[in-house]
């Protein structure tokens, strides 16, 4: 899972767009893995990124306009929200 994927999924959830789990199987098949593999890899990635907030924020600077939106990404509360939300979303895949 790339930083942009993290951002996209959090943003979509905030907009009220549900994860469409029926799309996970074809996408995982295209990559030669199972949906469970995808779920496990994303969960591992979230565990690994816990201390990588500066890298996430740096990457998002490439995509987000300066100002309130980018400032929010750097807040502790937002980061904790991201780290909580991604596993929650992933759990809906299987």
Image (cartoon, helix red, strand yellow):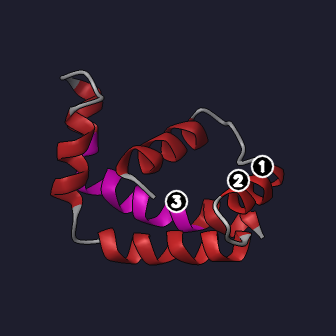
User: Where is the C terminus found, in terms of image quarters?
Assistant: bottom right
Q: Quadrant of residue 14?
A: top right
What segment carries the magenta color?
Answer: 73-87
Which circle, 2 or 3, is nearer the viewer?
A: 2
> Which residue lies at the image location 23% right of the left edge and 43% below the top edge?
59
> Which residue lies at the image location 52% right of the left edge and 61% below the top edge?
86
Q: Is residue 29 left or right of residue 14?
A: right
Label 2 residue SS: helix
Q: Position of residue 37 (x, y in %)?
A: 64, 76
- Badge 3 is on which residue? 85
Q: Main secondary structure of the magenta part?
A: helix
Front position in the image: 44 or 37: 37
- Badge 1 is on which residue? 23
Q: Position of residue 38 (x, y in %)?
A: 62, 69
Label 1 residue SS: helix
Mark 1 and mark 3: span between their CA atoms? 19 Å
Give the mark, 1 or 3, whose residue is nearer the N terminus. 1
Q: Vertical placement of 11 versus 29: above or below?
A: above
Label 3 residue SS: helix
- Badge 2 is on which residue? 27
Q: Residues within 10 Å of mark 2 (few under 14, many from 20)?
A: some
């Amino acid at each position: 899972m790339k930083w942009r994927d993290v951002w996209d999924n959090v943003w979509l959830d905030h907009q009220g767009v549900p994860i469409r789990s029926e799309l996970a199987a074809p996408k995982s098949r295209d990559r030669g893995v199972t949906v469970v593999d995808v779920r496990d890899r994303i969960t591992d990635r979230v565990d690994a990124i816990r201390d990588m907030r500066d890298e996430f924020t740096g990457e998002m600077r490439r995509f987000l306009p300066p100002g309130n939106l980018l400032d929010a990404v750097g807040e502790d509360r937002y980061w904790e929200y991201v780290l909580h939300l991604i596993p929650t979303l992933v759990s809906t895949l299987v």
